[in-house]
Every structure is written in structure tokens, then in C-alpha cells.
Amino acid sequence: MSWLEVENVSLAFGGLKAVDNLSFSVEPGKVFTIIGPNGAGKSTVFNLICRIYDPLEGDIRFGGESLLGARPHEVINHGIARTFQNIELFEHASLLDNLLIGRFRHGRFSPLSELFFLPGQLRQELEHRRKAEEVIEFLDLEGYRHARVADLPYGVRKKTEMARALVASPEILLLDEPSSGLTTEETDDTAFVIEDIREDLGITVVMIEHDMKLVNKVSDKVLAINEGRFLATGSASEVQDDPDVQAAYLGGEAA
Ligand SMILES: Nc1ncnc2c1ncn2[C@@H]1O[C@H](COP(=O)(O)OP(=O)(O)OP(=O)(O)O)[C@@H](O)[C@H]1O
């Protein structure tokens, strides 16, 4: 089983240290949640893991192997998929087509087999469709299969983004604020979905989240950061009871 390890990682934007000597590790098969006030550095941590940014120092390993040599589009080949705080989908394509694009990692493209649609190509195509349909069923998205993403209600688009990440069959799923913009009912549904992703699909979840009800419900372990630095880690209640965490939230806007 793979572990995700972030070790002494730092990143600055100009004079601002967005991530400051941060270390943590994620156990396989768990839901690991990163919390912190606005601007704490949470999304930057995801962007570092996904290789959008190069850390100034430190290492990020998955399954013992450093990710620092990987380019952003190669991170998926290491078994890491993500969703974004602001949904990033092909708005004018159908839900199904967005999922088929999400299967990119599994494609072996040869111009010849594409041109003549050789048996291997057909098998691959069928396998992509099978996986997409499996995820559509898993997330109860059957009714929206052929709808244009731009026409979908916000909550369904959010779920579609999760589906797009899941069709890549990742080992780790990074969820950036899965509840943001959702109604209370949709957030409750998201909690069940996250539990099913861990239990039924065996996928490790690393989540950034502000909604403490959702955090308390699904997290096996929580990490609190502020100003890019480690504050506390432990169970959701341990972290919320930590005086440094409470001071950080009182110092800024409560999340
Ligand atoms: N591309 C960038 N250029 C300059 N500064 C940035 C950039 N991205 C983030 N920052 C700054 O780095 C700090 C950390 O930002 P980040 O988005 O990681 O915080 P966050 O914890 O995800 O915040 P939120 O909860 O509001 O989404 C903030 O001060 C932010 O303004």
C-alpha cells in the first residue's frame, strides 16, 4: 500500500511564505482532511502535490517514490487524481464525454490503431466506457449521462468533477472543498459518497474542507495549518480542541 509523504516542504510567492516547512503523511485507506483559516496555504499544498508548483525545499513522495520529477500531467500516472475548488470541466461537452476524457491516463494511443480502429483500440474504448458507466452508477448520475455540463445544476457538476477524477481509478483522491457551494442535503450526500469512496472503492481521500460537520463525519485524521505552517494533527475533535488551532481561527475569519 502507498503512502503520501510531504516532508519539510516550503513555497513562497514573492515575500509571502504560503507553505512553510510543512510535513505530514497520509495513511492508505483513510480520509485525511486539511483545515485552516482562509489563506492558510491549503490549496497551495494540493498544487504542490499535483506538481503545479515546485517546492523551494523538501520532498513529496508517494509509495516511497519522489513526485518531484513528475510533470503536472504525469501525476495521474502515479495514482493521484484531484478535484478543484472551482469546478474545472469541459462545460460544453456531455457528462459522459468529460468522464471519457478523464480516462486519458489509461489510453495507449497509436495513430495506426486509431485510424483503422483495430481490435485493441475497440477493447480499450469499451473498457473506458465500462469504467465511465461504473462511476456514473456509483455516483447516481445515470439521469445526466448525456447532458451538457454547462446545463447541469451546480451540485451535479460538482459530483461530475468527482466522477471525472474517479474514472482514472486513482489510489488517492484529492478533494478541494467538496462541500463548497452545496446545500446542506447535498453536503450530507457528499459525506456518504466520501465514505463509499474509501470503503467500497478502497481509495484514500485527502480533502480540504471548511464545513466542520463534514470534517467531523468523514475524517480519520485531520491536519490544521495556518500561514503555511503546521498547527496540529489528530482526530477531528483533538484538532478542534487544540488551543493553537482555536487561536488561529479567532485571529482570522472562522472557517
Ligand atoms: N499564485 C499565487 N500568487 C501569489 N500568491 C498566492 C498564489 N496562490 C496563493 N497565494 C497566496 O498564498 C497564500 C495561501 O493561499 P492558498 O490559496 O493556498 O490558501 P487556502 O488555505 O487554500 O485559502 P482558502 O481557504 O481561502 O481557499 C494566500 O496568502 C494567497 O493569497
Image: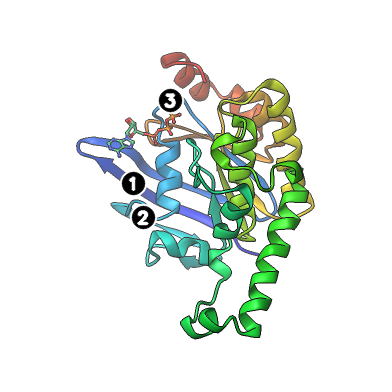
The secondary element bearing badge 2 is classed as: strand
Q: Earlier in the sequence, mark 1 or mark 2?
A: 1
Q: Is residue 233 visible?
A: no
Report the residue at 47% width, 81% height from top.
Answer: 111
Q: Position of residue 71 (x, y in %)?
A: 38, 63
The secondary element bearing badge 1 is classed as: strand
Q: Position of residue 168 (x, y in %)?
A: 60, 60
Q: Mark 1 and mark 2: span between their CA atoms?
A: 7 Å
Q: Mark 3 and mark 1: span between their CA atoms?
A: 18 Å
Residue 17 in which image quadrant: top left
Q: What label sits on residue 38 in the rendered view?
A: 3
Report the residue at 53% width, 79% height from top.
Answer: 114
- Give the class, few, some or many, for how many residues have Cα within 10 Å of label 3's Cα (few <14, many ≥20): some
Q: Which residue is mark 2?
A: 58
Q: Mark 3 and mark 2: span between their CA atoms?
A: 24 Å
Q: Earlier in the sequence, mark 3 or mark 2?
A: 3
- Give the class, few, some or many, for how many residues have Cα within 10 Å of label 1's Cα (few <14, many ≥20): many
**In front here: 23 or 60?**
60
Q: Is mark 3 within 8 Å of ligand 1?
A: yes
Residue type marked 3: Asn
Q: Position of residue 223 (x, y in %)?
A: 55, 37
Q: Earlier in the sequence, mark 3 or mark 1?
A: 1
The secondary element bearing badge 3 is classed as: loop
Residue type marked 1: Ser
| Colouring used for the render | rainbow
Left or right, 150 with respect to 123, comes to left
Residue type marked 2: Gly
Q: What label sits on residue 10 in the rendered view?
A: 1
Image region (quadrant) for ligand 1: top left
- The answer to whether marks 1 and 2 mark residues whose Cβ atoms lie closer than 8 Å is yes
Report the residue at 35% width, 41% height from top.
Answer: 20
Residue 170 in which image quadrant: bottom right
